[in-house]
Amino acid sequence: MPSRYILSIVFLAVFFSCKKTTSLPAQRQDRILEYKVANLTDSVIYGAIDDDSNLITVYVPFYFHLQVIDPAITVSEGATLQTEPLPVPITDTTASYTIKGKDGSTATYRLKIVIQAPPLVLQELSQPGDTLAYPVNGYILNIIGNFNTLNLNDFSLQLSSDATGHLYPMNLGSVQTMVLVENGVYVLNSPQIPADIESGLYHIHVTMFGQIKAAMTYPILIYNP
C-alpha cells in the first residue's frame, strides 16, 4: 500500500479520535457562589471561596476600622441559605453558613476573617537594668506602638506572670483610658492594672483587631503598695 494512503488513514483516525468529547462533572448544588462584605462606603470586599475545603476567607484591611462585617451571600440556583446572614464581629472565629441545594444536598462553609495590618511594634517601658514598677490596681501612663487606630475597641491587653505564666487582662474601660496621637506617635494612656494581680514581674501583651499581637521584651514590676 502506498505510504500516502497509510498517512491518510492515520490522519483520519487521529481526527475522529479528537472529536470525541467527555462530559464535565456536574456542579454541586449546595455552593456559596459569592460572599460580599456590604457594610462599607464606596468599597466592597469579596471573600475568597474554597469549595474543596468549604472555607470562606475574608481579608479586611485594618484601615477600614471595621468592628463587624455585614455579609451579602449568593448561593447556587435553587439552593437556600439555612443560616441567617447576621453581622459578624471581626474577632469571631466560629461563624459558619449551611446551604441546602435543590437536590437536597447540604454543605457548611466556615468563615475565616483575616485582618491585614503591619506587624505590631511596641516601645519598651523597662530597659535592661531599669525595670519600671507599678502598683496593683494602678495605671500604666503610656504604652506606645504603631496601633493605627484611635478606637479602644480594637485593643486588648494582658499581663503575663514571669513566675506562673498566668495571664491577667488589663482594664481598658476606665474613664482615664484613651488612645491618641502625639507628635505622630500612637499612645495608649492609662490602661489599668488588675486589682487581683499578685506582686511580681510581668510582660505586657497587646492584641490589635483580635489578631495582631506583640509583647514587650522587658518585664515591668507590679507591687502591692
Image (cartoon, rainbow, N blue to C red):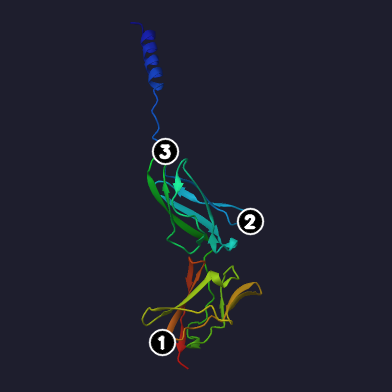
| Vertical relation: 3 (above or below) 199 | above
Q: CA distance from mark 2 to mark 1?
A: 47 Å
Q: Amino acid at mark 1?
A: Glu
Q: Between disc 2 and disc 1, whose residue precedes?
A: 2
Q: CA distance from mark 2 to mark 3?
A: 34 Å
Return the mark for residue 169: none
Residue for point 42% across, 41% down: 102
From the image, tell me which residue sits under label 1. 198
| Vertical relation: 41 (above or below) 214 | above
From the image, tell me which residue sits under label 2. 41
Return the mark for residue 27: 3
Q: Callout 1: 10 Å neighbours few (<14), some, many (20+)? A: some
- Return the x and y of residue 87 as percentages of the image width and height: 52, 59
Residue for point 41% across, 87% down: 198
Is 5 left or right of 90, judged from the image as shown?
A: left
Q: Between disc 2 and disc 3, whose residue precedes?
A: 3
